[in-house]
Image (spheres, rainbow, N blue to C red):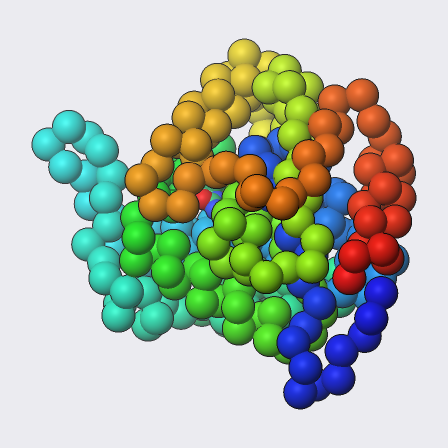
Amino acid sequence: MRWHKSNERQTIITIDGPAGSGKSTVCKEIAKKLGLIYIDSGAIYRAIAYALWNTEQITTDCNGKWFPKITYGTLSELPLKFEAKIGSIEIYFKGNILASEIRTPEISMLTSRLSKLKPIRDFANEIQRKIASKGSSIVDGRDAATVVFPDACLKIYLTASPEIRASRRLEEYKSRGVNVTFEQVLDEIKQRDLNDTSREHAPLKIAENAVIVDTSSKTIHQVVDYIIKLAKEQC
Ligand code: DC
């Protein structure tokens, strides 16, 4: 892998794919091994949704659907701060670090709905590009290869069956003490897949030159080693 001087373009690896495909585990591991900044774009979207909800900028329409009263201008005034680190990202809301509060089923569903909106996508894209300008990065995304970083040196599309993804998410919820059933998580995964693939702005889709990796029957180590091998060849 070629290391870039500060006046050159940074190395960017994008890992796109649906919820529960293993992106965050794979990205964290690769970031640690290669010393890359880890851009967790889902956490950025979640933090925006959390901040809008907690600053009471979400209202409901007559059908009970949530929508925010916001524009791009008001988003930049949200009390959020993003700090990129090697292998992690720290997000602060009103000076307090955000952790499990952005990963509840309610915030997951709210984020999935809000992430359809163009001002929110534009704002989240700008945050990701600003973080990536600080150093070589690996991006955990949905449209990282197609929209945010089209010039990335390596584009991976990670996937797995909905059932495998739901059982991984269930374990994650259980480890955080969230009480949900497999069926609820599977429904959530299917609903989020539908939201992610059918939205008008930057839907989840496979970039033309992406390498597709199905993680259903692979270990994390196999996936990580394969992607590192590709990164060494291509970046
Ligand atoms: O990866 P995640 O589960 O933390 O993502 C949370 C939600 O944010 C998910 O429903 C889709 C949305 N999202 C998005 O639209 N674009 C991204 N680049 C990342 C996440």
Question: Residue visible at 85% across and 55% down?
Answer: 233
Res. 32 visible in picture: no
Q: Nearer the viewer, residue 99 or 154?
A: 154
- Residue at 55% in and 60% down: 149
| Residue 124 image offset from top left, x and y in percent | 44, 59
| Visible residue check, residue 165 | yes
Considering the image in quadrants, where does the N terminus appear? Answer: bottom right
- Quarter holding the C terminus? bottom right
- Position of residue 99 relative to residue 218, above or below, is below
- Residue in front for this viewpoint, 40 or 181: 40
Q: Residue drawn at (14%, 37%), measured in percent from left and top?
A: 61
Q: Quadrant of residue 103?
A: top right
Q: Is residue 156 above or below residue 163?
A: below
Where is 30 relative to 128, above or below?
Answer: above
For the residue pair 225 and 100, the one nearer the viewer reads as: 225
Question: Going by the picture, which residue comes out furthest to the left?
Answer: 62
Q: Residue at x 57, y 51 (%)?
A: 145
Q: Which residue is at the far bottom?
A: 7
* Residue 91: image location, x then y, percent: 56, 63
- Left or right of residue 61: residue 67: right
Identity of the residue furthest to the front in this view:
208
Q: Position of residue 147 (x, y in %)?
A: 47, 54
Coordinates of residue 99 in the picture (x, y in percent): 59, 52
**Count of all numbered marks drawn on residues in the image:** 0
